[in-house]
Amino acid sequence: MIIGNGLIASLFKDYKKNDCVFFASGVSNSLETDEKQFLREENLILETINMFPDLIFVYFSTCSIYDSTKKESAYVLHKLKMEQLIKNNSRRWLILRVSNAVGNGGNPHLLMNYLVRSVKNSETINVHTKATRNLIDTADIKAICLNLIENHTENHILNIAYLSNYSIIEIVEIMEQYFDKKIELNLIKSGSGYDIEISEIENYFFKNHLDNKEKYLKKILDNYYSDKLCNNIN
């Protein structure tokens, strides 16, 4: 059972077992402040738990809760509230806090979509020199999630993120190599980042030889942005 139709929800459309609900229909805009949108997600969560009380309720939350610059934002406070709501109302649950997911489609304003679109259009990119982001391929989000379910991981909160963060400058330098194109930058001395603890899942990356940061990002570019700088970013 899948609730939602966005980037994360699409990962599980071919999941055939009837043992869990993948809830990926929540508020996804980290700048959201509309209380109606928050209430819509809250009501849908409770309705879904009541409809499927015996299934594992898999909820996709956010690693943004670790960002000191966003900890008082309406979005982060809402996500924490939803996590507690699930823990209080579901017998079987799995809460996955996801970092910056990169996949086929998604919001055009997501970091990688913005950067590649800027390269495609030969636009100057504003780079916050102190900013870091944790990029993770949606294919790995799916694989890790299914591994957890297969291993009967329940009533647990886990972070789903890559082994380490990328600075924005690091991302741009790798993109310059990948697209063989000089990118014009406007350097801004600002930005921030935060560490994400992933000790319970980090072996996945080592086991699958995904521990080289540069190769990992180039794999993401291969998967979603190769050749014609596909329509993924328009």
Image (cartoon, rainbow, N blue to C red):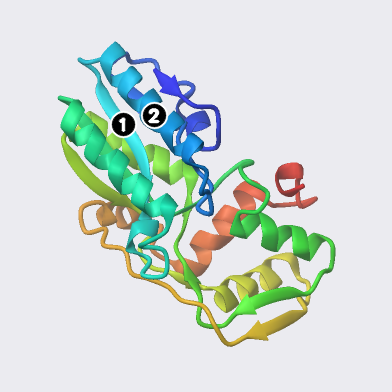
Residue 187 place in picture, x, y as percent: 66, 85
Name the residue located 42 percent from the left edge and 52 percent from the top edge.
74
Question: Which residue in the rendered view is the most extreme toward the bottom?
Answer: 189
Left or right position of 215 against 16: right
Residue type for callout 1? Val
Looking at the rendered image, the quarter that the N terminus falls into is top left
Name the residue located 31 percent from the left edge and 39 percent from the top edge.
82
Report the residue marked by disc 1. 58
In this view, 181 is above or below 84: below
Report the residue marked by disc 2. 23
Closer to us: 55 or 176: 55
What secondary structure is found at the residue carrying circle 2? strand
In this view, 216 is above or below 104: below
What secondary structure is found at the residue carrying circle 1? strand
Name the residue located 51 percent from the left edge and 78 percent from the top edge.
191
Spatial separation of the CA atoms under disc 2 and disc 1:
6 Å
Residue type for callout 2? Phe
Q: Are marks 2 and 1 in contact (CB under 8 Å)?
A: yes
Residue 21 place in picture, x, y as percent: 34, 22
Sort mark 2 into few (<14), some (14-19) or many (20+) by Cα contacts within 10 Å: many
In this view, 133 is above or below 53: below
Work out whether residue 152 can be spotted: no
Closer to us: 25 or 215: 25
Name the residue located 35 percent from the left edge and 52 percent from the top edge.
77
